[in-house]
Image: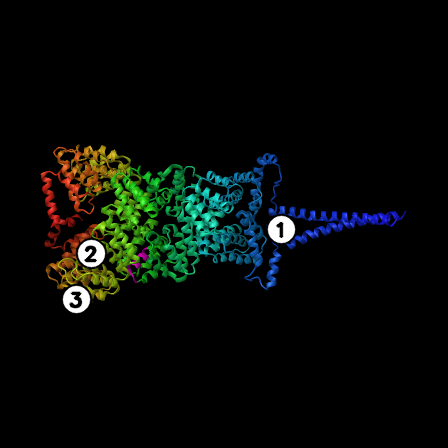
Amino acid sequence: MSTQPSTKFKQISLVGISLGSGLVLGMLVVVAIQNFNPLNSRADYDFAQSDLQQDSIKNGDYNSSESPVVVEKFEGIFNQHSTAEQYKVLYNTLSQSNEQELKEWWKQSKNIERASHRNIAQHVILHNLTAINPQQALRYVDEVSIFQSNALLTTVFSEWAVSQLEDAVKAAASLVDSRRIVALQAILESRDDLPDSELRSIARELEGEEILLKLTSDQLAAQSIEEPAKSWNIMLDDDVDNSLQKESFAKIAEAWREKDGFAVLSRIYTDLPNMRFELVRAIARFDLAGALAFTRSILDENEQKYIAMVIVNEWTRTDAQAALAAALTYTPASMASYLENSVASTWSYTNPIELIENIGTISEELRLGKLESAFWQIARKNPMEAIAKMNSVESYVGNTSSILDTIVFQWSYQEPAVAAEWVIKNFAEDDPQRHDLLESIMPRWARQDPVQAFEVAIAQPTRSEGIELDYWVIDEISADGDVELAKKLLPRVKEKTRLRAYTIVGSAMIAESQTEEALELGKDFEDDQRRQYYQRVLNDWASNNPKNLFETLESLPSSSIQSLAAIQLVRVNRYRPLLTDEQIEQVRTYINPDDEASDASSGILFGN
Amino acid sequence: MTQKKISVEYKSGLVIAGIFATGLAVGILAVVSIQNVSKRNEHLTQDVARVDVLQTSTERADNLSSKSTHIAGQFEEIFKQRSTAEQYQALYNSLSQNTEQELEQWWIQSQSIERTSHREIAQQVILQNLTKIDPQKALHFLLEILPLPNDALSRTIFSEWAVLNLDEAIEAAAALAGARRSVALEAILETRDDLSEDRRLAIAVQLDRAGTYHKLTSETEALHNIANPSESWDILLNDNVDDSLQIGAFVLVAEAWRGQIGVEVLSKIYHSRIEDHEIKRLLIAEIAQVNPALVLEYAQEVSEENERSYISHIIVEEWASKDPLATLAAVSSFKPSSLYFDLEEEIALVWAKNKPNELIQSIELMSERARVWPLEVAFAYIAREDPLGAIDSLSSIEDYVGSTTSILHRIVEQWSILQPDAAVDWILNDFDQEDPILLHSLLEDTLPSLARHNPTKAFDIALAHPTPSHGLASPLDRTIIWHLTTHGDIEQAISLLPRVRISSKASAYGIVGSSLVRKGQTLKALELGSDLEPQHQQSYFSQVIQVWARTDPIDLYESLEDMQSSDGQSLQSMAALKLLTRRFSYQQRLTDDQLKRARSFLNDDDRDQLQLIEKFQNR
C-alpha cells in the first residue's frame, strides 16, 4: 500500500516536470528565434537600442561614421509602403532614443540620398531631439540645406515652445532677422493657448509685433472665408501693413475667384494699389483667357487698361503668340492697339529672338521700337551677334540705323573702347551715322578712360550742326565729380562746344560749392554768351541752395549778376517755396528793369 | 511479459512526450500572446487606451455615436502629452489601424478641437492615414470642409497618394484648378524624387505646369552648388523660370553668398541680370536688414555713382522705417551732395509715412530743401484720421517752410477721398475765402471726389465758382466732366454737358467725345457734336476726329463715305485731312491706295492746307 502513493507522486511529478519543461522551452524558443532575426519581426517597434550601443562600443566610440545598424534601420523604415507608416515607425523608434542615439541617427540621416526620405527622417529626429536638448537641435539646423532650414527651424521651435517657452524665446532672440521671424511664427502658432497679452509680449521681445497682428488677422479672415468679401475687408481694416499679408490676400482672392469668378480683380485694383501687379498676376495666371474676358466688362478705363495689360503681359511670358492673338481681338480698337503694344514690349525682353523671328505679326507702327528693345537684350550678351541679326529685319522696317544705335549704346556699357573702334573702322569720317554712334559711346567711355575718349572726340571732324563729341566727354567727367580734370580739358574743347562745356563745368562747381570759381569762369565770355552762362549757373545755384544764394546776393560781383540771380530765385521759389514772402520781396529789389522786361512774358515773376 | 513492459513504457514515454509537447506549445503561445498584449499597450503612451478593432460591422455601426465621445476623450489624452513629438506619435499609433469609417469620425471630431495648433496636428495625421485607405475621400474633406486653400494639408495628401498610387494622384491633381493644382504637383514631385527626370517632367507637362517642374529642378540644382553661391545664383538666373516665382530661392542664395563674401554681395546683386527692379530691390533690402549701418558704409564707398545711389536708396528706405534718426546720421557724410540730399529726402518720406507726427515734430532736423514734400506726405497721413487736426497743426511748421499752401492742398485732397462732402463743406463754409485762387484750387482738389459720390452737388458747386481770371486754374465744371468720363461714368458726364459754362463747352464736349471714340462709339460721338453751337463745332469735331484717326485710322477711313456734314462742317474733308497728315507720323497704317482715295474727299480749303503741310515736310 505505501508503494502506490509513491508511484502516483512520481507520475504526477513526471507530468509536471514534462509540462513545465515544455512550457519553459517553448518560451525560450520564441525569444531565441526573435532575437536571431531582428529585422523581420521587429521592423515596426522593437529596434534593440542595445544593438546600437553594442556596435558603438565595439567600434570604440559613438562617433563612428559608419553605423550600419542605423543605416539598415533607415532602409527598413523607408521600405514601409506609405509615408504615414514611415512617420509612425520613426516616431515610435526614436521616442525611446536617448540624446546620444538621436545624434547618431542625425549623423546617419545625412547620408540618406533620397531627399524626400532624408527630409522625413530629419524632421522626426529633430522633433524628438528638441524635447531632450533643443540647443543641439538648433545647431543641427545649420547643417541642412538653406532650402530646408526654415522648415526645420519651425519644427524645432514649435516643439521647444511647448516644452520650455522661455528658453525658446531667448534662443529665438539670438537669431538673425529672417530666422528670428520664422522662430517667432512657430512659437506663436504652437502656443495659441496663451493669452493675447503674453503673445504680444513675446512678439514684442522678438521685435515682431506685426507678425502677431498678421497671424491674428489671418485667422479672423479664415473664419469668414465662406464670405470672401468679409475676409477681405477684415484684412484691409486690420492694423497690419497690407504688404505683409500678400500671401493671405492671394489665398482669399483665389477662394473668391473660385466662388464668384474674376470680379475680385477689380477689388485688388481698387484696394491694394501697392501690390495689384503681383496679385492680379497670381489670380489670372491659371486662366488667362478667362481673366482677359472679364476685363472687357470693366467700366473704368484706367482699371480696364491696367488689369488687361497685366494679364496679357503674363500671357506673353508663356505664349506670346496666343497673347497677341487675344489682344488683337479686343474692342475697341484703341484697346487692342494698347494691348498689342504691351504684348510686343514684354515679348521683346522675355524672348527677343522669338520676337525678331515673328516681327511680321506685329503692327508696322510698333515694329521698330520693339525691335530696338529686342536687339538691346541680345546685345547685352553678344553685341556682334545682335549686329549680325540686323539683316533679318530690314525688310520689315526699312531703316535699321536706330537699331544699330541701340546695339552700340548697349555695347558701350560693356566695352566702350572696343565699340568705338568698331564704329571708326566701319563708318567713314563723313558718315553722319559715325558721329551719332560715337555720341552714344562717349559718356561711358569718358567714365572709363576720360582722356582717351576726349582725344578721340576732338579728333573727329566738326559738324555744321549739332553738339560735338567733346561736349559729351566734358559733361560726363563733370557729372562724375571730377571737376579738376574737366577744368583742365576745358581750354582744348572745340570753339563750337565752348559755351556749353563751360556752363556744364560751372554748374558742377556750384554743386561742389565752388561758387566764386564758377562765377569767375564765366567772365571771359562776350555779352550774350556771358548772360547765358550766368543764367544757367545761377539757376542751378538757386535750385540747389536758394538760402545760400539769397544770403550771397549782396556780395555778387556785379549788379547784372545780382539781377540774374534774383530772377532765378523768384522763378525757383514759385515751385519750391523755401523763401518767405518777405525774402522774395527783398530779392525783387535786385532785379533790373531790362531783365524784368525780358522775363515778363513768362508770367512767373508776378505769380509768387 | 517483457513486451508488455516495453509496451507500457512506450506508452508512458509517449504520454510524457505528449505532455512535454503540450507544455512547449503552451509556452510558445504564452510568449506570443504576452508580446501581442504588450505591443497593444505600447501603441499609446501612458494611459491612452487602445480601441479594440475586432468588432463586427454591426457592432461598429452601433458604436459610432458613442465613438465620437470616445474620440473626443482620446484627443484630450493625446494632447495632454508633454511634447508635440509625443502627440504625433500617439496620433500615428492611434490611427494607423483604423478603418475608413473610424477615420471619418476622427475627422469630424477634429473640427471641434478649439485650439488651432492641436487641430492642425490632428487633421494632418488623420488625412495622411485616410489617404492610405481612400485618398479621394481625404481630398474631398480637404476641398469641401476647408474652403480656404490649405497648402500644408494638400501636400500631406498628395505626398502620401503619390507614393501609394502615382497615376491616381496625378489624375486627382489634374482635376484641381489654379494654385491648388500647382501645390499638388509640387508635393508629388518632391515626394517622388525617385523617378527619372523625364518622368517627373512628363507629370508636370500632363498637369500643364511644366514651369513648376523647372522651378523645382532649378532650385535643387542651385542648392547642390550652394558651396559656390555665385554659381547657384547663375543657375537661378539662367533657368527657364520667371524670377518672380523664385524670390524665396534668390533670397536664400543671396544670404549664403553674403556669408561667403560679406556685403560685397550687394554689388553682385546690383550687377546681375535680374530684369525686375522690384526683385532686385527686395533682395538688397533683405541683405541690408541684418546690419544696415555696415551695408550703408559699404554703399558709400562704391565707386560707380549709379550703383552707389541705387543701393543706398534701398538701404535707407528699409532702415528709415525702423530708425530714421540713425539713418539720417549715417547718410550725413555721403558724397556727392546731390546724393546726400536725395537720401535725406527719402528718409524723411519714409519717416512721414511710418510716423508722421514724429516727423513733423522733428522737421527742423531736415535741411530745408528736404522738408516740404515729406511734410505733405505726413500731413496727408494724419488727415486720414483727423483732417481738421491736421489743418490746425499747420501753424506749428510755418517757421520751417516758406509756405504751407501745398501742404494744405494735400490735406484737403486726402480728406476728400474719404469724406468728400465734409471736405468740400469745410472749404465753402470754414475756409478763409479771401484768396479766390487758393479757394478755387482747393475745390479743384476736392470736387472730383465729390463728383463720384454726388455728381449733381459737385457740379452745382462748380458752376457757382467761376474760374479766377488770373493763374493757371482749370474750369471746375470741365474738371468734373473729365473725372466722370475717365472713371467710367460717361453717361453721367453726358447728362451734365448741357449745363456746362459757355467758356468750357467746347473742351468739355471734346473730353466726352474723345472718350466715346476711344470706346468705339464713334457715331454717338459725332451725334454729340450736333448739340453744340456752330461756333464750337469746328474745334469739337477736329478734336474728336483727331482722336479717331489716332486710335483707329482704318475705321475712320472706312467711315469716310458715310460721314454727314453738320452745319457747314465738312466732316469728310476734315477726316480725310487728319488721315493724310498722319501719314507723316510713324504710326501711319493706311496703304498708298487708301491715302489716294482719301484725298478725293478733301474740299478746297483742306486741300490747300495739306499742300502747305506737305511742302513743309518735304523740305
Q: Mark 2 points at which residue?
A: A542
Q: Can residue B536 be seen in this view?
A: no
Residue A500, horizontal then vertical, whole percent: 16, 60
Most foreground residue, A53 or A436: A436
* Mark 3 residue element: helix
Query: Main structural element of the magenta stretch: helix, strand or loop?
Result: helix
Task: Tally the numbered discs.
Answer: 3
Judging from the image, mark 3 belongs to the subunit labelled: A
* Magenta-drawn segment: B303-313
- Say above or below: B251 vs A253: below
Q: Name the residue under label 3.
A: A492
Residue A41: which disc? 1
Both marks 2 and 3 on one chain:
yes
* Residue type marked 1: Ser
Both marks 1 and 2 on one chain:
yes
- Assess disc 2: are there few (<14), some (14-19) or many (≥20) residues with their C-alpha within 10 Å of its C-alpha: many
Residue A327, horizontal then vertical, whole percent: 29, 42
* Cα gap from disc 3 to disc 1, whole angstroms: 96 Å
Specify which label sits upstream in the sequence, 2 or 3: 3
